[in-house]
Structure formats: structure tokens, C-alpha cells
Image (spheres, rainbow, N blue to C red):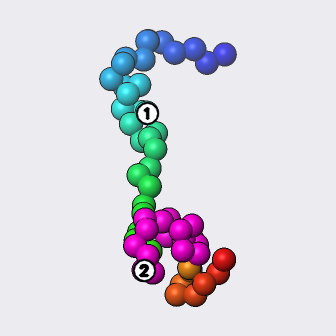
Amino acid sequence: MAVPKRKTSKTRKALRRSGIKLAKVTLVACPNCGEMILPHHVCGKCGFYDGRKVK
């Protein structure tokens, strides 16, 4: 059975986990109304997508 010879230090543990984090959400302004929306999504305020009324 694999058992570690030494205790993993706090620094080594933190360095290993440094890449595990939430990504920053990218928002863009709707070209029709200016509301901040996710890219490639229909605007919830005005209902436009790619210059056309969708909903």
C-alpha cells in the first residue's frame, strides 16, 4: 500500500491547489440596449441576438 514517507507541507499543498479557482465571468454589452450579457446569448432585457429580435 502506498503511504507517504513525510507529511505534505502547507506550502506544497497550497502550490498544488493554486490552479483550482473560479474563472472570472466574461460579460459584453448588448449592442441593442447596452445591458451586460454573456457572449453568444440572447439578451434578457430586449430579446435581441445577432441584430435580430429572437423573443
Quadrant housing the N terminus: top right
Q: With 15 as the anchor, is 45 left or right in this view?
A: right
Quadrant for residue 12, please give it. top left
| Residue ID for mark 2 | 31
Q: First in sequence: mark 1 or mark 2?
A: 1
Q: Nearer the viewer, residue 37 or 44?
A: 44
Q: Which range is magenta?
A: 31-47
Tell whether position 55 is magenta. Answer: no
Are the residues at dot 1 and dot 2 in contact (C-beta closer than 8 Å)? no
**At label 2, which amino acid type do we have?**
Pro
Look at the image and tell me whether residue 28 can be seen.
yes
- Residue 10 placed where, x, y %? 36, 18
Task: Name the residue at 36% across, 32% down.
Answer: 15
Residue found at the far left of this picture: 11
Nearer to the camera, 16 or 23 = 23
Q: Residues within 10 Å of mark 1 (few under 14, many from 20)?
A: few
Give residue 17's mark. Answer: 1
Q: Residue at x 66, y 77 (%)?
A: 55
> In the orientation shown, which residue stands out farthest toward the bottom?
52
Front-most of residues 9 and 6: 9
- Please, what is the three-letter code of the amino acid marked with disc 1? Arg
**36 within the magenta span:** yes
